[in-house]
Structures are given as structure tokens and as C-alpha cells.
């Protein structure tokens, strides 16, 4: 059985149930749960659609 950490009970403990605005695509009210490490080493969390994108810096978002 595969673990599914981005849905269900684990979201109850997160602020706003893990929802917010994605800093990459600017989509609002979407689950922002996936960690993304920028080219400069900065970390941020993004939506499911943007989790495989490559970004240079976190500040440019």
C-alpha cells in the first residue's frame, strides 16, 4: 500500500489545511504541499503542477 501524505488526516494539522497561493504559477486556494529547492539553495513549497519545475531563486517568485 502506498503512502499518501498529501491528503486526508495529515492535512488537518496544517494551517489552512495546506492551502494557499503557489509562488510559481500564482494559482490561489490550491494545496501548496510539495517542497521545491531552487538553484540557489532556497526552499519553498509549491503546488502539484509546479513541483517538477526548475527555478533559479526563491526571491524571484
Image (cartoon, rainbow, N blue to C red):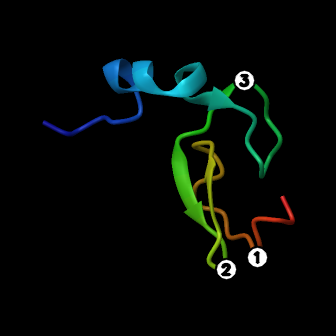
Is disc 2 in contact with disc 3, using a CB cutoff of under 8 Å?
A: no
The residue indicated by pointer 1 is: 56
**Residue at 80% across, 46% down:** 25
Which is nearer the N-term, disc 2 or disc 1? Answer: 2
Dot 3, how many residues are within 10 Å of its Cα: few (below 14), some (14-19), or many (20+)? few
Q: Residue 23 shows which numbered tag?
A: none
Q: CA distance from mark 2 to mark 1?
A: 5 Å
Percent from the top left, x then y, of residue 16? 60, 20
Percent from the top left, x then y, of residue 41? 62, 77
Relative placement, left or right, of 1 versus 52 is left
Is disc 2 in contact with disc 1, using a CB cutoff of under 8 Å?
A: yes
Which is nearer the N-term, disc 3 or disc 1? Answer: 3
Percent from the top left, x then y, of residue 61? 84, 58
Which is nearer the N-term, disc 2 or disc 3? Answer: 3
The residue indicated by pointer 2 is: 39
The residue indicated by pointer 3 is: 29
Amino acid at each position: 500500500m502506498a503512502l499518501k501524505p498529501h491528503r486526508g488526516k495529515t492535512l488537518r494539522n496544517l494551517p489552512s489545511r495546506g492551502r494557499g497561493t503557489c509562488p510559481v504559477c500564482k494559482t490561489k486556494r490550491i494545496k501548496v504541499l510539495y517542497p521545491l529547492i531552487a538553484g540557489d539553495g532556497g526552499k519553498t513549497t509549491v503546488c502539484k503542477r509546479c513541483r517538477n519545475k526548475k527555478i533559479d531563486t526563491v526571491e524571484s517568485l
